[in-house]
Every structure is written in structure tokens, then in C-alpha cells.
């Protein structure tokens, strides 16, 4: 709720424009969370303030002190009252620095900056009272202004605080003219009176662009209303401000700033000034304000200030009094209520008469009031909330001073906002105004029936705009009205409306799309339960539908709604609301949740649902509106299934609830949509999905459709949907495919199975049709029919299993024409896995019916082959989807075999499965690496029974203890790589781990490269002194390189990894032996890899590896240098420059490489040669280097003649 402004400081007025009683009425209960109990940083703050003289000169220390102080203060933004006991000493500490003449300007500005931070948190009105305001302070504060530069934007806090301080000194009860006689004068200068100096300062700062403008408005309000100033300066100041206002335009920045300052100053003056002083000028100000045409401005702040000033003028026109006709529920104060209850009725009446002693006189309302009310009513429809809120408060304040008849007319005008011709802004402003009128007692019980009617409409107000809707603010404000009414009226006044309001609030609390509205409705319901005590089952509902529970929309629709529907008063209103407002909602998620909610609510009122709701939904399935049609079909499906479950509990068919007409109507939904061509276009996506869900639910409900032609129509729809998935938008494709496949699985299970459990003869034409579709040129068609085959029931697959597996295996194979069909391969793998689960395992069973020893190797082969799918396209590594599905399928199949026929798990198959998954567990994509690790550990730790033939099981269990790995975040490279690289110590896994690590170490992602490299070096550190283990490791590394020659995905990353290993001396033990086989083989592989290559990245990586290989001794070093010199003459200038730079570093690193006599010349040639010059010139310098290093000059090979 919004807290209204409270008057601050001393106001020398006996009759303010806004009475204290009215200001009190605006203060409502402040509900702040009691997270903090006291200002716990008091000692630290003292130390911080005490350190300012020491740190103000150092920029870093000063900024740290400022930041720390802001952090401390910001903690108390929501509970600023905790600072109150400490405000005085904090202010005194800072003002001592300000008033000390020895303080440098920088320290003074810093102190004021700290003062501003405190003011920002606690509010300037509270802070004003603490400023020193003795006579001596007037001159000292004015003197401080002499050194201020209004254009210095770094020190605006100083000017802001000085203006506030000056405004307090204006409250001293002495005439300012007394100060003028003591002012010293210099010869030839005219003395300026104190009053004029303050007024000049205020005027100058009313037009600045920083926050000092706000403080200047406060200063003006304190100054102008002084008795001595108002006689001489009030008229001239108002004239100046109105002229400035009239001459400024809100089309320019300077104009906006000037208008803002003037409006703030005028609003403050008319708020704090005496009515008799302000009244003579009110009409003139109102006319000037009308001429400014502020409602046309696009500046929110100007429109808000305009509304604020208008309401202040209205309050000035009207005499300050509390209306005797207002509705009074009782005193706001609990103490006063207790005193009243202790008195007799006679004393209560006397006390009441004293409280409302002002008689409701029939006086003429000034002409300006009508204009004021009209402008406030326009403000209720403003496009910005702050303006509407200010207008609503103004309506409430002014209505409290009007005669009963006129106030009632105002209420009628506010109710006009609730027309369906008005925008959501008008509805929102109207709700705020009604809440204000209600809580002030200005909305009499006679108007309640009319008001409650519009508020109930506002609680469900929603207006569609394009792809979304507006109205959440209206519904939130309507909840606020209900909250305010709970506090404003006696229970007997609200009794006629309890049923309607309670149901509406419950509906908003659990079915509103917006979480803020749900929480607001829950709070309003709670307030009514506590204040009124007449809401049925209020306490029971509140314990379930509290503020936190209604935060989750699924929980609201599917769980809380069922509980509340158990109370008969709310059941039908909830169902009716879902049918009328939610199943036709623009948001797909709301329609789906509404249908599920109707399913859950059906057991509460089955008769009402079947006889009233279901027929209405059937009519809505023919609606021209797409959303209505979609929601109605989903609801019909869910309700039918819910009624079936109810009937089956009594061993009765669903037709006990649904009559023949309803059954026939629901059967015809598909045909009617087909006849009207509603399966086409964008709307067709929703219709296909909804009807597929309808088909599934109708079949599960056992409605008698045997032999009905509608089955053929349903089957056509499912097939056509699966066949045309490529026409469906990407974001809804998966959902529609799953709905169609699910419908097909249910249709096959319920319709095509004979009573004997065998398949219907129609099966013979379906499976060949599906297998033919697997070869479709459309990827999505393959996806759809792969999933369809995977969903078929067991009796359907009997006798066709081998045929189906062959067809699906073809889908999972990569061929040149369908290399990019990664999603089809993924769905094919999922289908194979699902079929294996469906048909079961029997070692000696027929291969056409079950998974057995004849087909298990083929199934494993299909799954393992897909572990090498690294297809990439414009979407990135789409092969990762296939690998993920392959890992999941391998896990499911292996666990199935372990539980049923472990004999079918061969040792070599199990080894290959574990190695391939381990490889994926150290690759570069976090999500797939984590999935692989989870699969690996699931297979390792499965013990029901344990999976046979897991290689190195004992070592693995010690490396990955069950208790430790459960807490590992495998998505985090820092946690995953140190664990998975331990597998390098197991020869069985080493090849695959190195293959995976190569991709990660040579990758692009910084965190992956960093932690994979660190983990690899940690392992190498442990083996680089052990020649035998290092020989084995290097042999495996070369094998990985050899197997992936010219495979850029691996080879480039592998070259980067080799560069790291060579640069870090991991193979130093090999350098003692001349022509070590590792170096010889590595050189041969590098030469083969870069032969005729034009890949810049690969060539650069190979240069780094070749430079690292120079550390090996023997003839191989000359061969390595020859390769490097060949690259110095490469056709690409960037390669020549890179090679020269790398060779330069190499010569510096390996001092024994070049003879000391020629070292300087070699370095000079490498550094001084322009390597991106013409090739003949470059090759001359290159050949000179060859001579210096004793390496044979490379010979140019003549190109073969064309046609030779």
C-alpha cells in the first residue's frame, strides 16, 4: 500500500489547508517484515564517520568509506525507524566537520554526502527536526551558500542538505528584519535583507536540474508562509512562479525543469499555508494551471505534480472540516475503542457529537471546486499509475469536505469510470478512488450494492491486447478495494455481499494468472476473515491458500483449488469461472491448467459438470475463436476422463453420467473440425494437439467406439499430424508430436487388441506404412513415425520386431543425404530403447518377438555407433542430442538386461559401453558431460544385481565412491575433470579419456580449458618420471592422433594439447635418447596432418607443436627444423609471420639449438625480416637461415604441366 505524505517541521499556522485529522486518516497500518531488530552497525558507523578527516584526501579510501556507509544504510530501507535513536549523534558528528572552519571543502562535501545518504533512507521530513535552528545558524548557513556552484554536479548533495537546513532555520519565531540591522556593510555596497537573500537562493535553486530543486521547494514553503514574509513577498513570489510556469514549455528540457520546480513550490505552499492566506490566490493559480495544459504532457512527474497542486487548490477552496455525514465504523486507535466500550451509550453519543461538532452547513461550494473535481476525475484515467494514485487521494480528500449530496455525485462520477467503453487505466483509477472513499467513510452503505457490482467485475477484468492482455493492475486495485472495505464497514453492512465477495476473492487468489494479483487477493481475503468474521470457512482456507502457497500457479490450479472446492459455497463459482473466463484465455498454459483443474474439480460436483458444464463446453468447441475452441476441447477431454474414473469406482460405464447426445457430440468434434478445415494454418497446431489429447482421454474412458467410423478419422488425424510435423512451428513441435504419439499408443492398446489379447488384422497394414515413412525425405516425418513405432504396444510388435528394429537402425545411420537429420536419429534411438522395454528380454526367445541373443548385438551396435555422432550445422553440435539419447538408451538397455538376462551382456560390449560413456564424461559441453557422468556412475553402482563384466570395477569403485560422487556437480568443470582424469591411470579407459580430453583441453571455453588442462597436468606430474608408464601413455596418445588424422574436430584440439604437454616438459625423459620413436612418429603424423592444408588454425597449432619437438635430440631435430623452414616460406603471410615469431622464441628457449657464433645473426634475420613481403624475397632470407643452422635448403618442386 502507498503511504501518504506527513507534514514535517514546524508550520506556523492555526488552520492549515489540510487538517491534521485528514492526515491521520491517511496513515494506515505499516506492515514491514521484522527482519532486523536494531541498528547493529552503530559502532562501525561511529568509526566510519570518525575516519572521514583521514580518508577524504585519498580517492580509493574515500570511495571505500562511501560505499561501505551506503551498504550499511541500505539495509534499513524497509525499517528506517530503527535508525531514529542514532540519527542525532550521526548528524552531530557530520555537522561538526561541516562547521569546523579548518575543514577543507572536500571534507565538507564528503560530510554532506553522508548526511544525504541518511536522509535518503530515513526521509527528509524526520531528518529536518534534528538540524540546528538557532538564530546564529541563519547567517552561518547563508554564508555556506556563497561558495556553492549550482552547476557543479559532483557536489549536489551539499546544496540539497544546505537548502533543507536553511528551511529549518526559517522557522525561528523572530522577524527577519531584526537581523538586517546587525549586518556589516562595506562602503559603496547596498545591503541585501536576509529575507531577500533567502528568497533569491530559493528562486535560483528552483530551476536547477538536480535534486536541490526538491529541497528549494521545501525552503519556499517554510519561508513564504512566515507572517513577516507573506505580507511582503507572497504575492510577488506567486506572481513570479506563475509567470515562469506560463512562459515554460514541457516540450523542452529546461522548460520541464522549471515547471517541475514551480509546481513543487506551489504545491508545498498550498499544503502548509493558512487557508485565509492562500485563498485569495487560489483562483488565479488554478486558471494558470489550466493554461499550462499539463494533461497533454508526456512527462509523468509534471502530470503528477499538476494533480497534486489541483487537489491542494480544491482543499483551499473548501473549509477544513470533518464531514458529519460520513460513515464511521469506530476509532482508528485501539485505546479509544476500549475507552468507548467502557462508557455507557449516553457518554458514547456525547463523545460522538463532540467528534463531529461541525454542522453540515448548506454553504455555496466555490466555482473552482467543480473544475478541480473535473481535473481529478480526468487524472483517474491518466496513463501512469502515480498520477492516478494522486488523483484518487485528491478525490477522497475533497469529498470529505463536500456536502453529502455533492459527495454522492462525486461517487457517481467515479463509478462512471467502470464502463466497458473505458480503458483499463480508468478502471484502475476508479478502483483506487473507491478504496480511498471507502476507507475515509465517504462511501455510504446505500451505495455498496452498486459499488460491489463493479468491483466484482474488476476482480476478473482482463482485456486482450495483441499477443497478451492488460488488466492485472485493475485486478490488483480491486483486491485493494476489498481490503479497504473490510476495515471500513461493520460486518452487518457487508453481510449481503459476503457470498459474492468471498467467492470472487477465492477465484482471484487461485486462478489469476498474475502472481501479484493472487497474493493481493489472498491478503484481502485474510483481512476480511479477520475484520468481518463472516467469510465461510475463512480460517481453514487461509491455512492452505496463504501468501506463499499461492505463489506457484500450478499448485493453485491443481492442488489448492481441490481443497477449497471441498467447501460447497465455493465449488460452483470456481467451476463457472474456469468455464467462462479461463478455458478461453489467451495464454496456452492457463487453458491447459484450467482443463486439468476441471478434471480435478469434477468429483466435487459430477452431476453439475455432466448436466450443465459439459453441454456448454460442447457448444464452445464450435466457437469461431481459436482459444475458446482449444480450451473447450481440452476441457471436454479432461472432464470425460474424470467422469469415467468416478463411474469406474462403482463399476459403471461413463455413460451413466453422459447421455447419448453428449457422447455423439464429443465423437463428432473431429469431423466438424475437419469439415471446416480447422486443422490448417497456425490454429491447426492447437487443434491437432487438443484433438489428440481428446482421442486419448476418450479411449481411456472406454466409450464404446468399436466398429465406429470415427476411429478411421482419428487414425487419419494422427498420421497426418506425424507426417506434417515440419509445417508446425518449432516451439510447439515436440508437444504436438508427443500428443499424437500418446494418442496412437492408446488407440492401438484400446482398439486394435482382441479380447484374446492378440492383435487385430489391421495391424498388418500399419507397421509397413510406418516403416516406409521412416525413409521420408522430411526429417520431422522420420521423427514422428520413429516415436510412433517406439510407442506401439507389445502385441502390435509381436512377429514384426526384427523388421521394426532394422527400420529404426536405418534411421540412426548417417548417410550423405541425411547427415543433418540429428533429431530423427535421436528419436530413432529413443524408439529402439522404448521397444526393448516394451517387448522384454528372453535369451532363447524368438528374435521377432523379444530381445534375445540373436538380436542383442545388433541393438548394441546401433546404439554404440551413435556415440560417434558429432554432426554440426548452423545450430551447433546437433550430434550431441544423438549422443545423449544413445547414452540414455545404453543405460536403460544394460539395466534391463542386468535385471532379466545378464548372460546377454558380453564382456567386450560392456567394455565398449563404459569406455564410450567415459569419453563423453570428459568432453567440452557441460550438460552432456554431466549426463554422461551420471550414466557412468549409475551403471557402476547399480547393484540389483550388479552389471557383469564392468572393466576395472574395483578400481572404479575406489576412484568414485558412492558416498562422495553423490554431491559432485558434474556440470562444473572444476569438479568434474579432476575426478574423470583419474581414469587415465586405467589402460582400458585411457584411449577414450584422451580422446575426450583432447577436445576439452583444445577447446574455446575458458573454464573448460583451464580445469581440463590442470587435471591433465596433475596426472602427467605423477607419471613423467616413470619411463614405462610414460611410454604406454605416449603410445596411446599417438594412436589417438593416428586414428583421427584429418579429422579437424579432434586433430586441431589434439595439436593444442600436444603443444601444452611439450611446453610443460611432460616428455622430458624422452629427450635423453636420440631419435626417440615418440618424436619420430609424432613428426610423421604432424607432416601428414598439415600436408596441403589451408586451415590457418591447424597450421598455427602445428607450428607450436613443431617448435616444442626441437627439444628432442638426433636427426629428428633437423627434420623438425626443415618443416619449420618450409612453413617460413608458406604462401600465407600470416603463417610465415607466426612461424618466425615461434622460431624466435624457440631459439631463446633452447640455447643448445644454435651455435653461439651465429646466434646473433639468426636472431637478427628472424626479427628484422619482413615476413609478409614477396615470396622470392622471403625465401632468400629463409635459405640464409638454413645455411646458418646447417639445415638443407628446401627445394621447390615444379608443378606438373596441365594434362600431363
Image: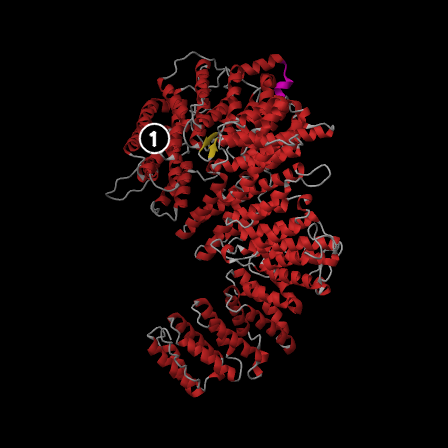
Q: In which quarter of the image is the C terminus?
A: bottom left
Q: Is residue 535 left or right of residue 898?
A: left
Instruction: Look at 57% across and 69% down and name the residue there.
Output: 1040
Which residue is under mark 1?
A: 296
Q: In this view, does 1157 lie above or below 583?
A: below
Q: Which of 1174 and 514 is in front in this view?
A: 1174
SS majority, magenta: helix
Q: Residue furthest right?
A: 945
Total numbered labels placed on residues in the image: 1
Q: Is residue 379 magenta?
A: no
The image shows residue 327 at horizontal and vertical percentages of 53, 17
Q: In this view, does 544 lie to the left or right of 444?
A: right
Q: Is residue 343 magenta?
A: yes
Q: In this view, does 254 lie above or below 584?
A: below
Task: Indicate the secondary structure of the residue bearing disc 1.
Answer: helix
Q: Is residue 959 visible?
A: yes
Span of residues in magenta: 338-344
Q: Is residue 269 visible?
A: no
Q: Is residue 688 left or right of residue 403?
A: right
Scheme by which the image is coloured: secondary structure
Q: Residues within 10 Å of mark 1 (few under 14, many from 20)?
A: few
The image shows residue 151 at horizontal and vertical percentages of 33, 46
Q: Which of 1164 and 1001 is in front in this view?
A: 1001
Q: In this view, does 820 lie above or below 28?
A: below
The image shows residue 656 at horizontal and vertical percentages of 68, 24
Amino acid at each position: 500500500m502507498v503511504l501518504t505524505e506527513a507534514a514535517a517541521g514546524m508550520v506556523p499556522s492555526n488552520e492549515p489547508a489540510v487538517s491534521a485529522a485528514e492526515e491521520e486518516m491517511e496513515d494506515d497500518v505499516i506492515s514491514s517484515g521484522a527482519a532486523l531488530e536494531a541498528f547493529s552497525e552503530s559502532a562501525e558507523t561511529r568509526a566510519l564517520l570518525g575516519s572521514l578527516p583521514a580518508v577524504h584526501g585519498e580517492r580509493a579510501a574515500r570511495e571505500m568509506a562511501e560505499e561501505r556507509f551506503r551498504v550499511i544504510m541500505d539495509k534499513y530501507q524497509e525499517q528506517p525507524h530503527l535508525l531514529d535513536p542514532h540519527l542525532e549523534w550521526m548528524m552531530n558528528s557530520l555537522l561538526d566537520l561541516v562547521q569546523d572552519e579548518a575543514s577543507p571543502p572536500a571534507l565538507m562535501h564528503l560530510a554532506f554526502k553522508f548526511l544525504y545518504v541518511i536522509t535518503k533512507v530515513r526521509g527528509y521530513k524526520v531528518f529536518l527536526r534534528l538540524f540546528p535552528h538557532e538564530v546564529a545558524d541563519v547567517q552561518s548557513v547563508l554564508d555556506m551558500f556563497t561558495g556553492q556552484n549550482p552547476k557543479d554536479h559532483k557536489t549536489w548533495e551539499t546544496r540539497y542538505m544546505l537548502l533543507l537546513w536553511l528551511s529549518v532555520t526559517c522557522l525561528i519565531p523572530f522577524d527577519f528584519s531584526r537581523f538586517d540591522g546587525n549586518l556589516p556593510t562595506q562602503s559603496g555596497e547596498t545591503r541585501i535583507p536576509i529575507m531577500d537573500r533567502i528568497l533569491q537562493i530559493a528562486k535560483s535553486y528552483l530551476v536547477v536540474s538536480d535534486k536541490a530543486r526538491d529541497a528549494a521547494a521545501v525552503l519556499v514553503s517554510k519561508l513564504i508562509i512566515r507572517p513577516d514574509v507573506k505580507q511582503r513577498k507572497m504575492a510577488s513570489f506567486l506572481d513570479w512562479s506563475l509567470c515562469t510556469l506560463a512562459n515554460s514549455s514541457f516540450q523542452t528540457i529546461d522548460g520541464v525543469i522549471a515547471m517541475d520546480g514551480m509546481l513543487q513550490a506551489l504545491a508545498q505552499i498550498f499544503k502548509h499555508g493558512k487557508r485565509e492566506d492562500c485563498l485569495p490566490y487560489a483562483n488565479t493559480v488554478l486558471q494558470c494551471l489550466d493554461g499550462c495544459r499539463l494533461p497533454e504532457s508526456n512527462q509523468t512527474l509534471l502530470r503528477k505534480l499538476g494533480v497534486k497542486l489541483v487537489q491542494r487548490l480544491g482543499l483551499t477552496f473548501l473549509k477544513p472540516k470533518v464531514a458529519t455525514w460520513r460513515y464511521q465504523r469506530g476509532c482508528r486507535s485501539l485505546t479509544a475503542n476500549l475507552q468507548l466500550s467502557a462508557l455507557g451509550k449516553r457518554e458514547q453519543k456525547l463523545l460522538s457529537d463532540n467528534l463531529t461538532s461541525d454542522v453540515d452547513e448548506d454553504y455555496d461550494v466555490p466555482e473552482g471546486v467543480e473544475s478541480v473535481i473535473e481535473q481529478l476525475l480526468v487524472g483517474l484515467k491518466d496513463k501512469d499509475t502515480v498520477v492516478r494514485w494522486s488523483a484518487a487521494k485528491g478525490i477522497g480528500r475533497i469529498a470529505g469536505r463536500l456536502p453529502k449530496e455533492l459527495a454522492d455525485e462525486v461517487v457517481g462520477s467515479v463509478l462512471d469510470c467502470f464502463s466497458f467503453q473505458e480503458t483499463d487505466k480508468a478502471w484502475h483509477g476508479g478502483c483506487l478512488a473507491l478504496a480511498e472513499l471507502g476507507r475515509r467513510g465517504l462511501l455510504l452503505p446505500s451505495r455498496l450494492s452498486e459499488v460491489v457490482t463493479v468491483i466484482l467485475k474488476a476482480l476478473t477484468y482482463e482485456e486482450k491486447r495483441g499477443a497478451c492482455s492488460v488488466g492485472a493492475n485493475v485486478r490488483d486495485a480491486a483486491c485493494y478495494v476489498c481490503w479497504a472495505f473490510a476495515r471500513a464497514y461493520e460486518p452487518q453492512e457487508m453481510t449481503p455481499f459476503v457470498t459474492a465477495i468471498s467467492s470472487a476473492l477465492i477465484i482471484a487468489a487461485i486462478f489469476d494468472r498474475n502472481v501479484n494479483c493472487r497474493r493481493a487477493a489472498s491478503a484481502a481475503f485474510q483481512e476480511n476473515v479477520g475484520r468481518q468474521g463472516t467469510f465461510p470457512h475463512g480460517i481453514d482456507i487461509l491455512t492452505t491458500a496463504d501468501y506463499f502457497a499461492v505463489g506457484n500457479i500450478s499448485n493453485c490450479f491443481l492442488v489448492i483449488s481441490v481443497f477449497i472446492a471441498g467447501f460447497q459455497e465455493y465449488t460452483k463459482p470456481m467451476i463457472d469461472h474456469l468455464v467462462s473466463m479461463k478455458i478461453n484465455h489467451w495464454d496456452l498454459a492457463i487453458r491447459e491448467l484450467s482443463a486439468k483443474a476441471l478434471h480435478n474439480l469434477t468429483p466435487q460436483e459430477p452431476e453439475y459438470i455432466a448436466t450443465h458444464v459439459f453441454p456448454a463446453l460442447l457448444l464452445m468447441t464450435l466457437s469461431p475463436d481459436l482459444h475458446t475452441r482449444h480450451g473447450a476441447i481440452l476441457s471436454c477431454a479432461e472432464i470425460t476422463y474424470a467422469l469415467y474414473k468416478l463411474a469406474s469406482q462403482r463399476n459403471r460405464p461413463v455413460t451413466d453420467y453422459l447421455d447419448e447426445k453428449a457422447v455423439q457430440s464429443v465423437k463428432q468434434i473431429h469431423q466438424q473440425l475437419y469439415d471446416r478445415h480447422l486443422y490448417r494454418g497456425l490454429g491447426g497446431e492447437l487443434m491437432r494437439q487438443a484433438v489428440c489429447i481428446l482421442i486419448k482421454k476418450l479411449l481411456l474412458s472406454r466409450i464404446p467406439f468399436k466398429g465406429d467410423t470415427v476411429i478411421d478419422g482419428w487414425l487419419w488425424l494422427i498420421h497426418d499430424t506425424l507426417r506434417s510435423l515440419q509445417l508446425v512451428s518449432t516451439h510447439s513441435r515436440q508437444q504436438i508430436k508427443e500428443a499424437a504419439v500418446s494418442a496412437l499408443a492408446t488407440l492401438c492398446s484400446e482398439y486394435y487388441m482382441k479380447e484374446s489379447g492378440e492383435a487385430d488384422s489391421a495391424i498388418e497394414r500399419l507397421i509397413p506404412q510406418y516403416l516406409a515413412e521412416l525413409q521420408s525425405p522430411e526429417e520431422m516425418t522420420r521423427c514422428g513415425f520413429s516415436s510412433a513405432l517406439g510407442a506401439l504396444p507389445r502385441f502390435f510388435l509381436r512377429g514384426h520386431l526384427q523388421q521394426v528394429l532394422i527400420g529404426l537402425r536405418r534411421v540412426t545411420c548417417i548417410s550423405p543425404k541425411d547427415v543433418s537429420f540429428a533429431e530423427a536419429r535421436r528419436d530413432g534411438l529413443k524408439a529402439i530403447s522404448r521397444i526393448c522395454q516394451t517387448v522384454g528380454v528372453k535369451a532363447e526367445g524368438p528374435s521377432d518377438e523379444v530381445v534375445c541373443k540373436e538380436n542383442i548385438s545388433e541393438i548394441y551396435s546401433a546404439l554404440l555407433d551413435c556415440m560417434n555422432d558429432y554432426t554440426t550445422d548452423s545450430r551447433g553440435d546437433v550430434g550431441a542430442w544423438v549422443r545423449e539419447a544413445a547414452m540414455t538408451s545404453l543405460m536403460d538397455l544394460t539395466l534391463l538386461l542386468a535385471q532379466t538376462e545378464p548372460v546377454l551382456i558380453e564382456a567386450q560390449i560392456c567394455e565398449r559401453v563404459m569406455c564410450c560413456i567415459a569419453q563423453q564424461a570428459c568432453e567440452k559441453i557441460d550438460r552432456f558431460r554431466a549426463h554422461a557422468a551420471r550414466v557412468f556412475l549409475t551403471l557402476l553402482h547399480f547393484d540389483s544385481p550388479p552389471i557383469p563384466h564392468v572393466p576395472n570395477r574395483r578400481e572404479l569403485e575406489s576412484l568414485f565412491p558412492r558416498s562422495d560422487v553423490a554431491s559432485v556437480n558434474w556440470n562444473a568443470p572444476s569438479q568434474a575433470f579432476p575426478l574423470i582424469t583419474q581414469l587415465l591411470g586405467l589402460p582400458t579407459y585411457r584411449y577414450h579419456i584422451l580422446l575426450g580430453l583432447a577436445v576439452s583441453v583444445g577447446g574455446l571455453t575458458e573454464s573448460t580449458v583451464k580445469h581440463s588442462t590442470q587435471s591433465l597436468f596433475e596426472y602427467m606430474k605423477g607419471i613423467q618420471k616413470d619411463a614405462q608408464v610414460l611410454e604406454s601413455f605416449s603410445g596411446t596418445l599417438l594412436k589417438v592422433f593416428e586414428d583421427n588424422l584429418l579429422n579437424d574436430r579432434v586433430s586441431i584440439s589434439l595439436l593444442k594439447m600436444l603443444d601444452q604437454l611439450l611446453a610443460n616438459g611432460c616428455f622430458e625423459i624422452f629427450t635423453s635418447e636420440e631419435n626417440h620413436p615418440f618424436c619420430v612418429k609424432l613428426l610423421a603424423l604432424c607432416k601428414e596432418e598439415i600436408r596441403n592444408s589451408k586451415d590457418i588454425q591447424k597450421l598455427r597449432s602445428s607450428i607450436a607443436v613443431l617448435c616444442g619437438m626441437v627439444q628432442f635430440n638426433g636427426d629428428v631435430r633437423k627434420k623438425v627444423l626443415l618443416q619449420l623452414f618450409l612453413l617460413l616460406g608458406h604462401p600465407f603471410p600470416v603463417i610465415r609471420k607466426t612461424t618466425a615469431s615461434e622460431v624466435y622464441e624457440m631459439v631463446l628457449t633452447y640455447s643448445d639449438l644454435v651455435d653461439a657464433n651465429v646466434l646473433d645473426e639468426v636472431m637478427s634475420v628472424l626479427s628484422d625480416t619482413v615476413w609478409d613481403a614477396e615470396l622470392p624475397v622471403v625465401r632468400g632470407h629463409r635459405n640464409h637461415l638454413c645455411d646458418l643452422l646447417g639445415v638443407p635448403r628446401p627445394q621447390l618442386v615444379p608443378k606438373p604441366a596441365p594434362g600431363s
